[in-house]
Image (spheres, rainbow, N blue to C red):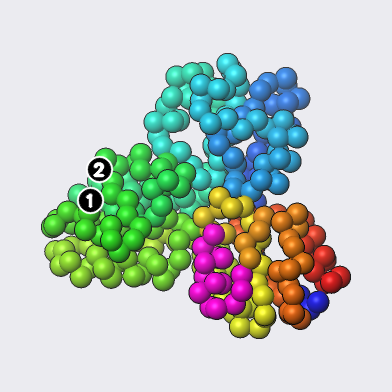
Amino acid sequence: MNVLVARKLGFCFGVREAIKLAEHTAAERRAQGRAVHSLGPVIHNRQVVARLTEQGLQTIESLAEASAGGTVVIRSHGVSPEVVEEAARRGLEIVDATCVLVKRAQEIVRQLHREGYRVVIIGDPQHPEVQGVLGYAPGVIVIDSAEEVDRLPEGGRLGILSQTTHSAEHFGRMVGLIAARGYPELKVVNTICNATTERQEAAVELCKQVGVMFVLGGHHSANTNRLAEICRETGVPTFHIEGLEEFRTEMVVDQTTAGVTAGASTPDWVIEQFVRHLEKL
């Protein structure tokens, strides 16, 4: 089978740095005989989290689960200031692996509030990045669909930003719907990650050249799910799978050319293993 790989795919800078920091911290604290935890998975990728667990990084869902005097790695999605304060009260060491672009979004929320804007985030309210950003200003409103625009106040000054893993098209549509409501002042800040945009554009380009498309990455990864949605919107049969273990030969029946892309939290070895398997078919 002929396999074409997207020109941009896989680990982004923020994910790569988060993993590097997590690995270093796990090795160092383990050598010291100290417990080291991650508050939630460092990134949304099952294979990477499993490898980090083998290296001594224990994933926990709340600070109450952390060992006394232990170290807690803040994952790439970031957390609210309240979580950091709670960790300090519990005597836990914090190692911050928050993506620099998520940190920028956090600071923008804080600044918009200081300037007197009602902050609006275009994003998934259940996504850990959004949940963390919410803590940087009071009264932040999160919407993610046209139907939810009606939840916004009737007037006033709005400061609008996006979840970093959203598409520019979706963000633009939502801003247009909000602007149509006639607010006296809107301040819009583009907080979408360039890596996300590049991967989406490269995926669309690739869809024009293949008969079937594979999107590799965690099923809980927002940017990977969006990649799959964008590929499906082109009309090309698209499969979102975590890796080779989910592949079935029926997916490529009667196909001669397959395209492969991957989310920003998908490691190179998962991509390479999958591509090699397809090329042998």
| Residue at (51, 25) in percent of width and height | 63
- Alpha-carbon distance for marks 1 and 2? 7 Å
Q: Is-magenta flag for residue 233?
A: yes
Residues rendered magenta in the picture: 225-238
**Does residue 157 lie above or below 204 as drawn?**
above
Above or below, 29 relative to 132: above
Name of the residue lying farthest toward the right: 280
SS under mark 2: loop
Please name the residue that numbered disc 2 is placed on: 139
Q: Quadrant of the N terminus?
A: bottom right
Q: Residue at x 59, y 40 (%)?
A: 41
Q: Residue at x 55, y 65 (%)?
A: 227
Three-letter amino acid code at the position of disc 1: Arg
Question: For residue 206: magenta?
Answer: no
Q: In terms of secondary structure, what is the magenta stretch mainly?
A: helix
Label 1 residue SS:
strand
Q: Which residue is mark 1?
A: 118
Decide if residue 198 is in sight here: no
